[in-house]
Image (tube, helix red, strand yellow):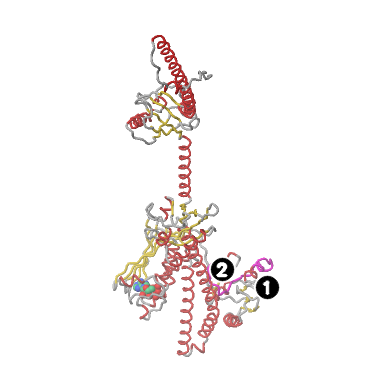
Amino acid sequence: MPTPTVAPTPATHAKTTAPTAPTAPKTADSEARRLLHELQVHQVEILQQNEELRTVRAELESSLARYVSLFDFAPVGLVGLESDGSIRVLNRRAAAMLGASLSGGQALRQFVAPQSTAALMLALAGGQTGQQGPIELQLAAPGPVGARFVDLEVQAPAMDDDACLVSLVETTERRHAQSELRRARDLLELSGRVAHSGFWELGSEGRRLAWSAMAHEILEAEPGSVVDLEELLGCLADGEVREQLQAAFEQGRQGTAFELEVPVTTMRGRAIWIRLSGAPESDSGTPPRLLGTVQDIDARIRLEQARVGQARAESASREKSAFLSRMSHELRTPLNAVMGFAHLLAMDAAIAAVPQSAQRVGMIQDSAKQLLSLISEVLDLSRLEAGAVVPTITSFDLVSLRNEVAAMLAPLAAEFNVCLSLPACEEAVHAAADRHRTRQVLLNLLSNAIKYNHPGGEVTVQLRDAGQWVEVAVMDNGIGLSDEQRLRLFQPFSRVGAEHTLVPGLGLGLSISKQLAEAMQGRLEVSSEPGVGSVFTLVLPRGSGTSAAVTALETVPATSAARPHRLKVLYIEDNPVNVVMMQALLEKRPQVLFEFAIDGASGLAAARRWRPDLVLLDMQLPDVDGGWVLRQIRADPELSRTRIVAVSADAMEEQQRAGLAAGLDAYLTKPINFDRLLSLVDDTPSLL
Ligand code: ADP
């Protein structure tokens, strides 16, 4: 607007000039002029004021415009509310947030989800009473990824009346991020739980620890109970392990990742193994904070330790078994010679004629027999303890086995003047067990019942079918056992008092019998009363009705009278003492033509050349395995009718079974049972 031009009348001069003395017309005139002048002065003043007013208004308008644009484009939503909660004015951000029209007029509550209405009302009421603080509200209109949220804060009533101004800040994304973070944390915790791993974080100052719920669980600590690294390490371990842990954390703080497996004590005092790993994480220049995991590896470590222990025990047991079997083999060879020559001496008429000499030879024979049974039983026991005895389970009739054992022990019963009673069984009683091993157990039980008896005593062997079990009860009315003796009964070498008597024994039979019964899925029970007698009951799984074929290891043909035909016997053996002894023994059979070879190759050559009726074969030869010689002879059609009998110091059952399966006619173990050898010789048909 153009500035009005004013006559250059100095207003100040006009104001300060004193009025001139009035004269009639002249006075009226000058008065008019004065008034006009004043009028002009006022007019100028008014014009000036107008001008100032215009300037102020322009400034006001521009500041209002600035305010409006500030309001409009503020980065937060701003809403001016009437006292009834309707929108008087709102900025663009608020309009976009709420989806409201810029012209206002609607109630704010209609833009808020129903579940947030009460909170809004409360906030507005609080705002009016001057209480402040943001509250979170859910908006009515959802966004593209679900519900939307705003933080609403009532500013102090800022408007001219009861109305107020509220600010709105959208928090949907923040909420989203927070719930994502929560989910990620939950996932981490869950995966830790699945992997049995906890997480921890050590602050860059090197002391403050934060650890996950799973980490607390592993270390059996109350959540938040320990937050100081040194305190935690002090609780977990001491001595060397603690130093190891401290060194690991120090290494981490120096910037190198670490991992270690250590035994610790949990907060509840339980000893466990943990795997602790940590890695530094640092913005350059600052000391690193450490992040890591803690894992409960107790079960794994204990399993590993158990495996190592078991492997060690197994290897020790294998070594023990191997040693015992080697030792038993080594002992059997010289024992063979002792027994053989003692036998020859006993048969010598000159010796038999001198009672004292005959008695001494008898003592040599008894001692040798005792030594032999000691060797066999110790070997048996060690193999049982090592779990190396695998019974061959078949179904067989216990009645016939009982009668067989009783027949074998009839001479012993006669010697001790004890009567053997075998109550009749109407039907066969079948056991599912190893017949050979069952016979061994029954031999032990029956011979004990006879030995630990008194002259005129009685031993009864009763069989009973008891559902899925069968029982063999060996009852005697002998010396009996006290409770204290019964407790020590099955320990190896425990003779529970019999060591002070003349009754022969080693104290191994019952411990072997018990282990054999258990190896056959059965058991051995005992009841006894001192002075009254004992009952030893072998309980075995019941077998099926039909008797299966049983592998007879030492089945030899029944003895028959010596026949007058010529019989060619080839002995393949490297030990000259054994050869001499065999030759001396076979001299008792005049029809025998004896030849020997000292190794496998020459033995096979002799067999092919001489075609013997019987080959006595040592299974351990200096050049080849006895099994090889056996296979070669069996493969030779010219030698198809030659009998082959192993004479071996190897008393292991597996060897015997394998040999019989490979074509041996019989397997004799050293020391040789001469009666059996001679009956074998007698039974061999001559090929001549
Ligand atoms: P051994 O008979 O060689 O000494 P065992 O292991 O067979 O060894 O028996 C261990 C001990 O148990 C015997 O020495 C004996 O004292 C006692 N015993 C075994 N059977 C009987 C029984 N029927 N009556 C009394 N004592 C027995």
Which residue has dot 1 on it? 604
Is 615 or 22 nearer to us in this picture? 22
Dot placed on the residue nearer the N-terminal end, 2 or 1 = 1
Q: 291 or 380: nearer the eye?
A: 291
- Between disc 2 and disc 1, the foreground one is 2
Q: Which amino acid does label 2 sit on?
A: Gln
- Label of residue 655 in the image: 2
Q: Nearer the viewer, residue 229 or 644?
A: 229
Where disc 1 sits, the SS reads helix
The secondary structure type at the circle numbered 2 is helix
Q: With 7 as the anchor, is 106 left or right in this view?
A: left
Percent coordinates x, y for residue 53 in the rendering: 45, 22
Give coordinates of residue 462: x percent, y percent: 36, 64
Residue at the location (51% across, 62% down)?
550
Determine the image quadrant of residue 672: bottom right
- Give 273 or 354, whichever is nearer the viewer: 273
Examine the rendering and report whether any part of residue 633 can be seen.
yes
Horizontal and vertical percent position of residue 257: 54, 57
Q: Which region shows up in magenta?
A: 631-656
